[in-house]
Image (tube, helix red, strand yellow):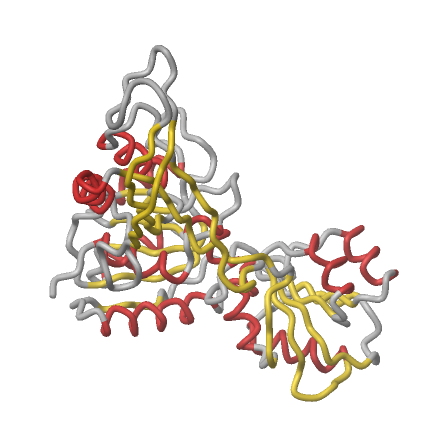
Amino acid sequence: MACRVGDIIALVEELAPPYLAEDWDNVGLQVGSERAETGAVLVSLDAHPRTLEEARSRGAGMLVCHHPPIFRPLRRLVTDEPVGALLRDALVSGVAVYAAHTNLDASPHGVNAALATLLALRDHRPLPAEPLEAGYKLVTFLPPEHVAEVSAALFETGAGAIGDYAGCSFRVEGTGTFTPGPSSRPARGEASGPNVVSEVRLELLVNREGLEEAVEAMLSRHPYEEPAYDIYRLHGPACAGLGRIGDLPEPVSLGRFARKCAKLLGSPALRLAGDPAAAVSRVAVCGGSGGKLAPRAREDGAQVLVTGDVGYHEAQEAVEAGLAVIDAGHYHTERPVVPHLAALLSGRAERSGLEVEILVSDVHTYPWIDGGAE
């Protein structure tokens, strides 16, 4: 079937739910319409003039990137400035731009899973491990004759969806009690004295983004003056974290492992802090900027942290605490997620029957000239 931008967004957000993003981040659709159709999607690390041109030349109507082009709040859209020009060009060319940033960092399918897999880490797990939020359960109590109306209103908001199933709820009959106050006007029972009435407990699952809308829909249809309802925050297995940690197939020297990292990641200016002769077997990784994870990596038994953008004092403190650091650069520790994410999206799109081609960007947006110019 024809593929829309919104279909791809749904696939990306299955892999990297937006609620995993940091509060300061700006993830999601940056430019374009969810209703627009596209026959091809380009996956890239950056939304850049060259990746946008690549999307156009390869017939992609959507660019899925890691770094959001709208990162800081925009007070004006000036096309003489780089961000303004990029957004204008995306709109004019009809290329939707979607960003999965720190949610893709924290996802068990994202940046650090790709990096750990490329480095052949065994049994890699989150660092630090955080409970993966599974959404919310909304519970309310209703007269039996109002259950259908309130349920329908909730289902319209998307509540009650579990995987490929919609309209999912749990209902159980019970007994409610109440005593009206002097100024109350109860929808059921007597205006004075204690009341005992039959009620139905209605339960539905709601995702984080739809919670407010679902509560508003429930309250707008609820017959009671003072509806009783509960919201339960749910958690899945502990499988989210901004880094990952795992074990090498066999211990190797730090120097040898650093050379392997440079080769696999294509990093032309890898930096090593630590004793090259030391043996390493447990490795922590954090694509991008991960120096702040050094203390946690050491606590979890890592002998080396592979990351990028490590500061002078961060490296110094890590080595003094017994943790080696390999700084392979921001770009080169995140780039492995591009083909990794493209492969995951391609498989899910095919299983969903979507007629779309998922493309891996050939454009490299690494800004540095290592060693300087001739």
Image position of 19 (left or right of 163): right
Image position of 40 (left or right of 216): left
Give the tally of numbered discs: 0
Q: Is residue 367 positioned above or below 353 on the image?
A: above
Quadrant housing residue 16: bottom left
Residue positioned 17% across, 44% down in the render: 148
Q: Residue furthest bottom?
A: 250
Residue positioned 55% across, 65% down in the render: 112
Residue positioned 11% across, 66% down in the render: 1
Pick the residue in front: 226 or 374: 226
Instruction: Measuring from the top left, give residue 306's x and y in whole percent.
Output: 66, 67
Pick the residue in front: 182 or 41: 182
Image position of 21 (left or right of 41): right
Q: Residue furthest left?
A: 1
The answer to whether residue 114 of the structure is visible from this angle is: yes
Residue positioned 26% across, 27% down in the render: 189
Image position of 150 (left or right of 195): left
Quadrant housing residue 354: bottom left
Q: Is residue 302 positioned above or below 21 on the image?
A: below
Q: Is residue 139 positioned above or below 114 on the image?
A: above
Instruction: Measuring from the top left, give residue 179's x and y in whole percent.
Output: 38, 24
Check the picture and name the quadrant holding the C terminus: bottom right
Pick the residue in front: 53 or 91: 91
Q: Is residue 109 positioned above or below 314 on the image?
A: below
Q: Residue furthest front?
A: 193
The answer to whether residue 53 of the structure is visible from this angle is: no
Quadrant housing residue 260: bottom right
Q: Residue furthest right?
A: 320
Instruction: Measuring from the top left, give residue 75's x and y in whole percent.
Output: 40, 24
Pick the residue in front: 211 or 346: 211
